[in-house]
Image (cartoon, helix red, strand yellow):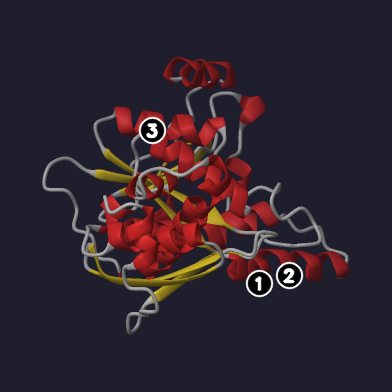
């Protein structure tokens, strides 16, 4: 731990942008603070990182702390870093300055997710298996992660950032930046590494615009079928492969069975919660890599499991 003053006066890799690196930024709020982190991932490790920051001394120090904590470390260890670790590296922050640690963590994770998606090659664990778990921050995905980790597998959480619209509640909507932060905090609280994938462009091009076009043409599109079939799950399964994860678990209420000829999608045990219809476009090869831990459970039981876990 260097402390806030040391990180401010002699920041780690400030102004350094690794060649071929991936960049994430956070800030631009009323306070004017902005942190930008760039990093490179080779194999299973963050091999280089740098940052820049504008605003108060705490923002500069937090960017330095985040980069110092990430450089040279395994990707899945860096995925466990959050505002608490950044603040601890600074010797603690007063409440008025804690936002600096949050900005640095946000920027770090945006860069980390982009790099992991493009260049990571994490080997499968030598003992046991690894599962990637989709987490939205809600109770269903949290219990899915809980059940996956209780099964003895190494669970890694992932959250998708799908939406940002300054004119239409960008912070309160599902899969917004604030929802991603909430999901990350929940995953870290469960002891899980967490990655973020920015799919805002893909979501707008592959789901929103086709929905608008179909609606204008007098059709009745189902955006959830398109989103799950061509945007969300494809991206997460690709990431799972890069992270050495054998499967992807989600909080959908659905089941997959094998009739001897291959995987088949089946309705959830609780008909009122069934979500199999939004997965209807998935190919058998995709279904074979998916797991739905809630498929046999009723919603009251899911709430009980969440309450028992605290």
Of pointers 2 and 3, the one earlier in the residue sequence = 3
Image marks 2 and 3: residues in contact by CB distance under 8 Å = no
Residue at screen point 58% across, 23% down = 270
Residue 15 image point, x, y percent: 40, 79
| Circle 3 crowding by C-alpha within 10 Å: few under 14, some 14–19, many from 20 | some
Q: In this view, does 152 lie to the left or right of 66?
A: left
From where the camera sits, is residue 234 visible? no
Of pointers 3 and 1, the one earlier in the residue sequence = 3
In the displayed image of the protein, which residue is found farthest to the left?
A: 126
Q: Nearer the viewer, residue 18 or 217?
A: 18
Image marks 3 and 1: residues in contact by CB distance under 8 Å = no
Q: Which mark is residue 128?
A: none
| Circle 1 crowding by C-alpha within 10 Å: few under 14, some 14–19, many from 20 | few
Q: Nearer the viewer, residue 169 or 144?
A: 169
| Circle 2 crowding by C-alpha within 10 Å: few under 14, some 14–19, many from 20 | few
Q: Residue 190 carries which label?
A: 3
Residue 86 image point, x, y percent: 38, 50
Secondary structure under tag 2 reads helix
Q: Circle 1 sits on which residue?
A: 205
Where on the picture, by quarter, is residue 182? top right
Residue at screen point 22% across, 59% down = 73
Q: Which of 306 and 86 is in front in this view?
A: 86
Where on the picture, by quarter, is residue 30? bottom right
Name the front one of labels 2 and 3.
3
Secondary structure under tag 3 reads loop
Image marks 1 and 2: residues in contact by CB distance under 8 Å = yes
Q: Distance between the residues labelled 3 and 1?
A: 34 Å
Q: Distance between the residues labelled 1 and 2?
A: 5 Å
Q: Circle 2 sits on which residue?
A: 209
């Amino acid at each position: 731990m260097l402390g806030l003053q040391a990180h401010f006066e002699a920041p780690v890799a400030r102004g350094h942008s690794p060649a071929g690196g991936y960049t994430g930024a956070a800030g631009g709020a009323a306070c004017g603070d902005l942190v930008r982190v760039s990093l490179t991932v080779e194999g299973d490790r963050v091999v280089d990182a740098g940052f820049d920051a504008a605003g108060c001394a705490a923002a500069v120090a937090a960017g330095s702390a985040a980069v110092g904590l990430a450089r040279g470390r395994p990707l899945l260890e860096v995925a466990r870093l959050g505002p608490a670790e950044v603040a601890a590296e600074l010797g603690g922050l007063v409440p008025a300055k804690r936002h600096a640690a949050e900005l640095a963590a946000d920027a770090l994770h945006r860069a980390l997710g982009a790099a992991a998606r493009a260049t990571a090659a994490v080997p499968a664990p030598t003992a046991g298996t690894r599962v990637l778990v989709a987490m939205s921050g809600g109770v269903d995905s949290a219990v899915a992660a809980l059940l996956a980790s209780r099964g003895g597998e190494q669970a890694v959480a992932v959250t998708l950032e799908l939406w940002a619209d300054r004119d239409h509640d960008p912070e309160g909507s599902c899969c917004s930046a604030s929802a991603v932060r909430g999901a990350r905090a929940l995953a870290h609280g469960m002891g899980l590494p967490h990655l973020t994938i920015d799919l805002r462009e893909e979501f707008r091009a592959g789901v929103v615009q086709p929905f608008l076009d179909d609606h204008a043409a007098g059709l009745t599109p189902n955006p959830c079928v398109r989103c799950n079939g061509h945007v969300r799950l494809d991206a997460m399964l690709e990431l799972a492969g890069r992270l050495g994860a054998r499967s992807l678990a989600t909080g959908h209420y659905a089941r997959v069975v094998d009739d001897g000829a291959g995987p088949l999608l089946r309705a959830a045990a609780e008909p009122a919660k069934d979500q199999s219809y939004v997965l209807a476009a998935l190919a058998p090869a995709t279904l074979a890599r998916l797991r739905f831990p809630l498929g046999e459970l009723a919603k009251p039981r899911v709430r009980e499991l969440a309450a028992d876990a605290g």
